Image: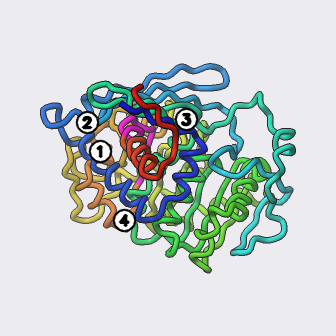
Amino acid sequence: MPLTVLSDKEISDLLHSLTKEDIERLQHNLAEALHSYSTRTQDETSACSQNQPLRTSITTHDATTLFMPARTESLTGVKVVTVGKSSSFSASASTPANLSTSTSTTSSSSDPPPNDIPTPQTQSQANTNTNTNKPSTKPTGTLTLLTATGAPHAFLSATTLTPFRTALASTLLLRKRRRVRTVLVLGAGAQAYWHLRLSLLLRGGEMEQVRIATRSFASSGSPLLACIYTDPRWSALRRANAKLGFSALGREHADYERLLKAYVRDADVLFGCSPATEPWFPAGYLTSPEGRRKGRYVCLVGSYRPEMREVEAEVLRCAVRETAAGTVHTHKHAGTGGAVVVDSLEGCLSEAGEVIEAGLGPEKLVELGELIVVRKAERREGTVVYKCVGIGVMDLCVGGDVVELARERGIGTTIEGF
């Protein structure tokens, strides 16, 4: 049986070539896999949650290695990925060569970019400026896929595939939101990159402002913003909407706290994409009467360990207290009332710092795969909070689809008779 091998560059090039229609097809398959994971039993499918072991990890002083086994109807596999504790933006295969930084702390414009947007460095400059002793937060690892009978099927780099599959799941909910005019992204790494790219592919024509908040504009916000303006793979997305503007804000800015509060309050969509151990802002930005004047989609994907949290626990507590008149959740865990949407009940109860600190039990969580409940939540104008720590079913489903696309397009290396 042939074995397909896909490098990170091959996967990145393939993913960057996908159209809106391609993304929607991938999302349909992912939604079906998550639905089986959340709602079906061992008697009905091998892809149910009972057949998905919880991931395990090895943590050192500068990195965490995660082991994520999983099973779908057609594939068995395991992803092994290492995530460093650095907070810097890494370009690598997801973006052009490392980008120079700027002393500016904010920048906003429409196409073409202003003169103070940095341009890509030469490879020699990138090599000189890279600190090889500081690991990147961008996941590095592999995904091994086997057929249902155990035959080797594919071996893939997981570096770009991991943030892509996370964003693919997150934007399932984005597609159903009525208002996506203003988007705020917390963080500027690979997760931020792919959440922005998929959001623009799916709903970019309705957006007016995309804002990026970072701990440091110079080391992360500026490179990501420059990538959006200088990478030719982003040009069609930028030009598709003449009203769309991009900006970045770093802590260096003298008015950082005031601007961040305004950005949070103004956001229709908020993506948390950083491995933060301290919340980005006080909960009151969202939970006060002023903060609750509008509903938002709050998507938290950056933190994945109990000690990590991107927002304060009260944001989640407020979300489960809020219930639209006449709304009743009818899913296997929660009773009446509000709920936080999660990718995995077991995973988030044991690994999501925000969920643990908020003291939420299973009756206040609903899995993304329980699609009937998700649809009801999305039709509301109120705030929907989605928390994701990552599950292996996502990797197998999306990885399998990427392998099929690669074979159709003649991408990758095929080893016959492996």
Using the numbered discs, state the Cα–Cα distance from disc 3 to disc 2 in whole angstroms: 29 Å
Circle 1: element type: helix
Earlier along the polypeptide chain: callout 2 or callout 1? 1
Dot 4: within a 10 Å radius of its alpha carbon, few (fewer than 14), some, or many (20 or more) residues? some
- Residue beneath the point at 81% across and 59% down: 118
Label ID, residue 33: 1
Earlier along the polypeptide chain: callout 2 or callout 4? 2
Using the numbered discs, state the Cα–Cα distance from disc 4 to disc 1 in whole angstroms: 19 Å
Q: Residue furthest front?
A: 416
Rendering colour mode: rainbow
Label ID, residue 308: 3
Q: Quadrant of the N terminus?
A: top left
Q: Is residue 362 magenta?
A: no
Earlier along the polypeptide chain: callout 4 or callout 3? 4
List x then y, in percent, for residue 141: 55, 31
Using the numbered discs, state the Cα–Cα distance from disc 2 to disc 4 in whole angstroms: 26 Å
Earlier along the polypeptide chain: callout 4 or callout 1? 1
Q: Is residue 82 above or below residue 127?
A: above
